[in-house]
Amino acid sequence: MPGTGAAAPAWALLAWALLALPPGLPLRPPRGPRRVAEKEAAFNTTYADWVDADLLNIYAFNHSVRRNRTEGVRVSVNVLSDHKDLPVLFVVRQQEAVVSFQVPLILRGLYQRKYAYQEVSRTLCQPQTKAEVETQHFYVDVSTLSLNASYQLRVTRVENFVLRTNERFSFNATAAQPQYFKYEFPEGVDSVIVKVTSAMAFPCSVISIQDILCPVYDLDNNVAFIGMYQTMTKKAAITVQKKDFPSNSFYVVVVVKTEDEACGGALPYYPLSKNASPDDPVDQHNRQKMLEVLVSPAITSEAYVSSVLFCLGIFLSFYVLTLLIACWESCRQQKRKGLLAAMDSPSLDTGHARSIPDSFLGHSPYDSYGYGSFGNGSSGSTEGVTDSLGSAEVPYGYVGQEQFKRRTPSAPTRPLSIAMGRGERSLENVAGRPRLDSLSSVEEDDYDTLADIDYDKNVIRTKQYLCVADLARKDKRVLRKKYQIYFWNIATIAVFYALPVIQLVITYQTVVNVTGNQDICYYNFLCAHPLGNLSAFNNILSNLGYVLLGLLFLLIILQREINYNRALLRNDARALECGIPKHFGLFYAMGTALMMEGLLSACYHVCPNYTNFQFDTSFMYMIAGLCMLKLYQKRHPDINASAYSAYACLALVIFFSVVGVVFGKGNTAFWIVFSVIHIVATLLLSTQLYYMGRWKLDSGILRRILHVLYTDCVRQCSGPMYVDRMVLLVMGNIINWSLAAYGLIVRPNDFASYLLAIGICNLLLYFAFYIIMKLRSGERIKLIPLLCIVGTSVVWGFALFFFFQGLSTWQKTPAESREHNRDCILLDFFDDHDIWHFLSSIAMFGSFLVLLTLDDDLDCVQRDKIYVF
């Protein structure tokens, strides 16, 4: 009789169950030889039976299978007796596999908590068929050590066991009744996307893709042993490639977890019954989930090629456009040179700048202030007073200037003389002397001591109306070296930063590929196209724009620097004495930062997660900081921050970014400390900008502050000396104090984005102030920068729209993050975040061009006629 010889394995399993029982458990020994009842059984029939320690029930099933048709077989049992300490053991013996489970089924959750299930259903692994039609046998053995246990057994065929392409299939699953289905790759399809959805977020479930092997790991405690898997609330998607499965088919396994904490849910609370132990299994009752699965073909290799070409075409077109504009500018300059050559006027190269036509050089509304001379009465007397915030003796008109205005209302206009070492020198000559190419801002025989030079700085920088010439007194070679340090420092930072980052993300990707755990990386799984070992090649490709446009910007800067150096070699008066001083080091640093932003953003998207978020945000902070420094440097070249102090401040920002993300969530103490630091830093920076560095932070600072408040506010109320500067700083303080209050009250979860928003708000404020003051000063914006401003603003608007779509977030669990996943929207290859990469790289490039060309209208205006603001 078939299956007679199979009783021996059943007895062996029974003996194993006896040994596994806890000591001291009351058992009734068998009354002699154990009886074996073997029964022929049929599909779709419910067998209500009982079993005890003296009885072993064996159910024999057989069914015909075809080679070209796969059918699933499912065994469902329900134990009606309540003997948790003496479970019923079910053993399913197949031709090439054995499946065994006990009922009640005990599964463990977090903290080893036990959960018991009385109803269990398992799908049997399907062996390979060799003949065209084959009859297969399998047996279900039922045994127990309890006195009497009644149960129900039912074996059915699984309808729709083989999933069809582009056809949805709905089913239910529980922790003790997992489901799995088979999918076979059709001809011509190399990869597919398995999408599983559910209308209910909980209970938490796991989706696994496994090879056609026996056994199938379909329980909560073993589903992660093999294949690819990810947790799921409402959405899950896994891209499967044919090359990874030699049999050209795979199983889609769906398991409901015993607890929801892995998906962001709360740990369940089940009150203990009377006389119950905390270690007793908990009955979860009807914890089931309805799901729907859809398998659809992924994109073809042709789509990869077309997407790469599309990406290259977009950004290489900027190279072509730049070349055309350069040719147009060159032709325009040639025409201008021909016009100048035909004019009956002295050559600009002779140094007679005054003979240039006014229409060519342009005019400034501040000519009447007499830049370079102190003869104007607005400069006031130079009788020294103690610096209100510094420690040096400086002229009236610095801090507490209203005293001077009140005390000397009719001060005569006369040349000013100040004792300087060996003799007296007219300040009119000091302020108006030519800018010589020396290694310091003054000649060696001008002053005897460093104190005299510092005093000269006080005189110059505390004038009420400053021109660029006043803040461009240092030697060009010294400043060139100073600002080139920005580039070399950021290049060094980039190397030391990028190499470990690349190594780390390669390790991350390797771990994902080896373990199959797709909860490690926060992709948009509905639009993640793998290539080679990369899981989301599209997110990496879309960062190409940062690199290409950053390189293009560096080439533009290089060409400008070459032209400028040639003009200096020709002793061109416009290059020497006109326009905003040309320093290219910060521009090189900005272009390098843009390229590194693309590289590190690509590294981040190799495996985006909680531990590597700062890879690309670090260079976002750097770009924002460098843009503000460049904007300030334009009209303050002598007093701009050094590279060392600037990068030290940016390092501090990145430090706070990491600390805020790791420790800031819900931490009141951190937010208080950060808000205080934010406000204090804002006040210190405001003071530095208002007094242009001519103040000192020492033990006498409070006394000097009180003195200023008394003289300018109490004794006689007077307005600030630098009104425009004060307006900017007041607005900046209002915005920064508001942002600090917002952070302290709301405590946003995404601290990195909050910190970036602070930098962007300050950059936009300063840029708007610069534009407004430029127009107020009678300057104009040329066509190219105007087009860049308008186009960049529009592109930034669209870019931010796509950025805030939020396709994933590492602030939540991987399962919750996948609820935000969306399908591709461009060429069936790029998603919303990829479009953000495209548009933001273009917008950053456009912003850099605005900073580069904004003051091109001043190239023919002398520096002592360009207003500082």
Image (spheres, grey):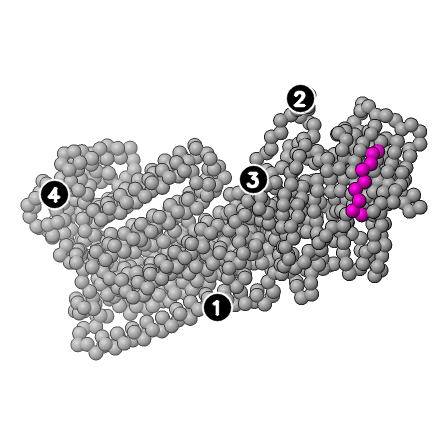
Residue position marked by numbered label 4 in the rendering: 405
Kindly identify the amino acid type of the residue bearing the numbered disc 1: Gly
Q: Position of residue 471 (x, y in %)?
A: 25, 53
Kindly identify the amino acid type of the residue bearing the numbered disc 4: Lys
Which mark is on residue 274? 2
Residue shown at the point (36%, 53%) measured from the top left: 627
Disc 3/disc 2 C-alpha distance (Å): 31 Å
Nearest to viewer (mark 2 / mark 1): 2
State yes or no: discs 1 and 4 in contact (Cβ < 8 Å).
Answer: no
Is tag 3's residue or tag 2's residue first in the polypeptide sequence? Answer: 3
Is tag 3's residue or tag 4's residue first in the polypeptide sequence? Answer: 3
Q: Quadrant of residue 846?
A: bottom left
Residue shown at the point (19%, 76%) measured from the top left: 343
Please, is residue 230 above or below residue 674 in the view? below
Kindly identify the amino acid type of the residue bearing the numbered disc 2: Lys
Q: Quadrant of residue 483?
A: bottom left
Is tag 4's residue or tag 2's residue first in the polypeptide sequence? Answer: 2
Q: From which residue to which does the magenta span run?
A: 43-51
Disc 3/disc 1 C-alpha distance (Å): 43 Å
Please, is residue 83 above or below residue 681 in the view? above
Nearest to viewer (mark 3 / mark 4): 3
Mark 4: secondary structure: helix
